[in-house]
Amino acid sequence: MSESDPNGSDPRLRERLDSLKAALGRAEAAEKADSEKAGPDKALAGAMSSGFRAATDMAGGVIAGALIGYFGDRWLGTSPFLLIAFLVIGTIAGLRSAYRLGTRPSSPKGGEPER
């Protein structure tokens, strides 16, 4: 039985590794060139996207809380209590979502993978 050398002395394995390294180098160079072409327009679009998402998360939380509270009050006959409670809960949920969006890293630095 012939076992392959763990150091990679097999010529076919070495050829495959070299071709994979070359392909990886080409892919990284192409990605770097694409990111340099994008420039500030892509950064502005990303910032606007994050801002609109934070705004819709906030509005969605408040509106959902208001609707749940309003219909809960109508169903149970408790005038403003559920409305106020669910407005507070919806506002907290919207703020939490916007906070989590703001604290997430925008792009990996130094080739670190995203989490």
Image (cartoon, helix red, strand yellow):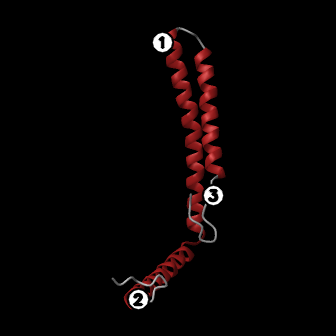
Return the x and y of residue 41 as percentages of the image width and height.
57, 67
Mark 2 vs mark 1: give the one in front: 2
Q: Nearer the viewer, mark 1 or mark 3?
A: 3
18 or 103, nearer to the observer: 18
Q: Which mark is residue 61?
A: none
- Quick one: which residue is furthest to the bottom in this view? 11
Residue 46 percent coordinates (x, y):
57, 59
The image shows residue 76 at horizontal and vertical percentages of: 51, 10
**Residue 86's image quarter?**
top right
| Amino acid marked by disc 1 | Trp
Dot 1: element: helix
Disc 2 and disc 3 in contact, CB within 8 angstroms = no
| Residue at point 60%, 62% (across, down) | 44
Numbered mark located on residue 75 in the image: 1
Amino acid beneath label 2 = Asp
Q: Is residue 79 above or below residue 27?
A: above
Q: Quick one: label 1, few (<14), some, or many (20+) residues within 10 Å?
A: few
Q: Residue at x 60, y 69 (%)?
A: 40
- Disc 3: which residue: 105
Q: CA distance from mark 1 to mark 3?
A: 43 Å
Q: CA distance from mark 2 to mark 1?
A: 76 Å
Q: Is residue 69 left or right of residue 13?
A: right
Q: Is residue 82 shown left or right of residue 71?
A: right
Q: Would you call the spot at circle 2 few (<14 residues within 10 Å), some (14-19), or many (20 or more)?
A: few
Where does label 2 land, which residue?
10
Say which residue appears at 45% left-offset and 87% top-offset.
18
Is mark 1 in CB contact (under 8 Å) with mark 3?
Answer: no
Q: Secondary structure at mark 3?
A: loop
Foreground: 14 or 99? 14
For label 3, the crowd category at 10 Å Cα-Cα, with few meaning under 14, some 14 to 19 and many 20 or more, is few
| Between marks 2 and 3 in the image, the one whose residue lies nearer the viewer | 2
N-term mark: 2 or 3: 2
